[in-house]
Amino acid sequence: MSELRAQLREWRDAVQKRLPPWRSRALAGLLIVIGIVLPFFFPPSSGFMNATIIAVAYAVMALGLNVVVGFAGLLDLGYVAFYALGAYSLGWFGSGFFFKAHVHVLVSPVTRTLPGIHLNFILLLAGAAIICAVAGMLIGLPTLRLRGDYIAIVTLAFGEIIGVVAVNGQSVGVGGGMTLTAGNLGISAVDQPYFPGIGLFDLLNLRPWYWLILAIMLFVLFVNLRLRDSRLGRAWIALREDEIAAVSMGIPLVRTKLLAYSIGAAFGGMSGAFFGTYYTEVNAGQFQFGFSIFILAMVIIGGLGSIWGAVVGGLALGYINNYLIPDVLNGLPGKFGLNFQLTQVEFGIFGFLLVIMMLLRPQGLIPERRRRLELTAKIAAEDSQLMEAQGTIGGST
Amino acid sequence: MNSAGTSAPPASAALRAVHVTKKFGGLDALKDISIDVPQSSIVSLIGPNGAGKTTLFNMLTGLYRPTEGSILLGERDITRARADVITGYGVARTFQNIRLFGAMTATENVMIGHHARMRAGLFGAILRPPWVRREERETRARARELLAYVGLHESVFDRLASQLSYGDQRRVEIARALASQPEVLLLDEPTAGMNPRESHALTEFMRKLRDELELTILLIEHDMKVVMDVSERVTVLDYGEKIAEGEPAEVRTNPRVIEAYLGRQE
């Protein structure tokens, strides 16, 4: 078994040596081109396009959470809070919800006649990112002094608090008969993105939506890659590995953790803002604890700390959740004469997938380079110990 | 004897602890300790296990706050400064049980040591302007120089720290501490687990550090041969108290020190 593994590794290394050094860039470029032309192969408003859009938006969230959990090693179980806050930023400043106000910035001619606050989508996106980053900092300041499991517990509670505030916000007045949220009724008729020269997006043609979220994901991906190979990225890994040593080497503990937390929050907020406009409403029912775990599962299945892993994990779970289970395999149990649909056992399926992953490939689909090195080193070390043990047996007889 | 070092502190003391006490609950880990580490000297801190040597190190580097007393780096009071700030001021350390970042390469570990001297922040990292690229390149080059300086072979520069041999890990830790460009270097049992030949090499290396980089070195050490060989002054702790201080030869013949190490002679 170990011989086979060593042989495979040898072959892989040999193949990698033959390929030119720019191969990873070429591969990334190719993937981006495929991503851009993808919608032309599918009808503009198919179920598959819808699933793709949601999957890419999930990937954005997975990339955000990966900064917090994967890079900095802060287990955040309340990431849904930033999805909620991002979505609400969009609902507040991009709909007629605050009907007493009349603010319009760079919106379509039709929207310009409506009451409420209406900002251009790019402003909303940036605003959601900033609001979430600031919120992340405020939550993080007292929280991130804690270590390990305590952070998980506090973030978990925070996620729940935001969910409850979202529901009960409908009875919190903000003056003039307006409320903070619309609870489970939802802030609806949220503005759809409008860009001068492109026009207003509509849900009959999903292609522009897809390119929009793809652009957001590429931006987030770029930022992630840049951060990973920087002074800040190194500091995160160091903190994850050994807090005491990192602090003794001059890394400011709270500030560095706060940056990870609020950058992750900002990305979650961007994705949340997109979901707000894509679903055309911001409903308190969307922000459940289960969603935090769902995003975390994407990061873990992809490979904790791995940027490409987060993308693949987000896309994979997105497709499974929104295409494979409801559209493709949903009737499968019925074909076997079983009286249930696959969508009813979604969580069971995800749990099963996680268990399978942990058994077969605990490092994730695309493991982080460091973890890969660690694992191969461990295998090599175990092998050498075995040899040593055999040596002593041979020597004693 | 107890107050020998505190009555007239040399003006050029690089690092001083003044009447420092540390209590953990009801336990006095350190009681009224004063110690001077003169500029460009090598001072050893010795004592039986549990004497409070590492506790003192942790206070000098800001990991613990003294319950009473103060700590001075040159003229600056660093008693209440955070550990990372103290590193910025020019104090670096190694750890008794090596604390490298196992998932990072030797080079990356040393680059972390240089963290406090770098300027790139969040936007520098994302936008990566030319000065950030240059800073990153120079940090990497400097890290490799330092690894060579502490005697590592180039073939292990890009190995994960956790994969390195014990001796190499100790070397990387010293290189990492040096990368922060310290004025004062604290070494916590640097020769632990080394054979006599390696210990001797390290002793020579400490002298070289002092002479070439003009470092002030405070070390915790159990190997008496190393202590007698390298240090200009020795401070002895026992049960959280300073029981002796002076030149190595003086301390070696001090009855209280002998008693602390070997027990009372009846």
Image (cartoon, coloured by chain):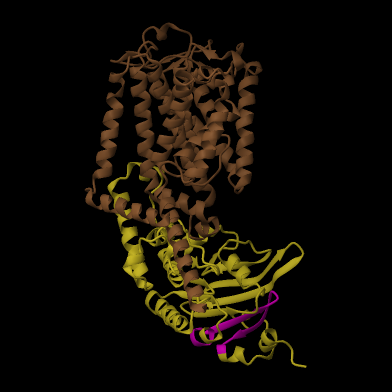
Is B230 covered by the magenta stretch? yes
Closer-to-camera residue (A147/A98): A147
Closer-to-camera residue (B10/A102): A102
Closer-to-camera residue (B154/A187): B154
Is B153 covered by the magenta stretch? no
| Tally of marks | 0
**Which residue occupies 62% across, 46% down?**
A149
Question: In the displayed image of the protein, which residue is found farthest to the front?
Answer: A397
Span highlighted in magenta in the image: B227-248
Q: In this view, does A143 lie to the left or right of A13?
A: right
Q: For residue B49, what is the image quadrant?
A: bottom right
Q: Chain A is drawn in which colour?
A: brown
**Which residue occupies 41% across, 15% down?**
A192
**Which residue occupies 37% across, 48% down?**
A229
- Eyeballing the image, is A17 above or below A89? below
- Eyeballing the image, is B164 above or below A202? below
Q: For residue B72, what is the image quadrant?
A: bottom right
Location of residue B192 in the rendering, given as x and y in whole percent from the top left corner: 53, 76
Location of residue A144 in the rendering, given as x and y in whole percent from the top left corner: 58, 45
Residue A308 visible in image? yes
Q: Is residue A162 left or right of residue B89?
A: right
What is the quadrant of the N terminus of chain A in the image? bottom left
Location of residue A206 in the rendering, given as x and y in whole percent from the top left corner: 36, 16
Closer-to-camera residue (B85/A246): A246
Q: In this view, does A181 lie to the left or right of A392?
A: right
Residue A259 visible in image? no
Location of residue A231 in the rendering, given as x and y in whole percent from the top left corner: 40, 51
- Eyeballing the image, is A349 above or below B104? above
Which chain, by letter, is yellow?
Answer: B
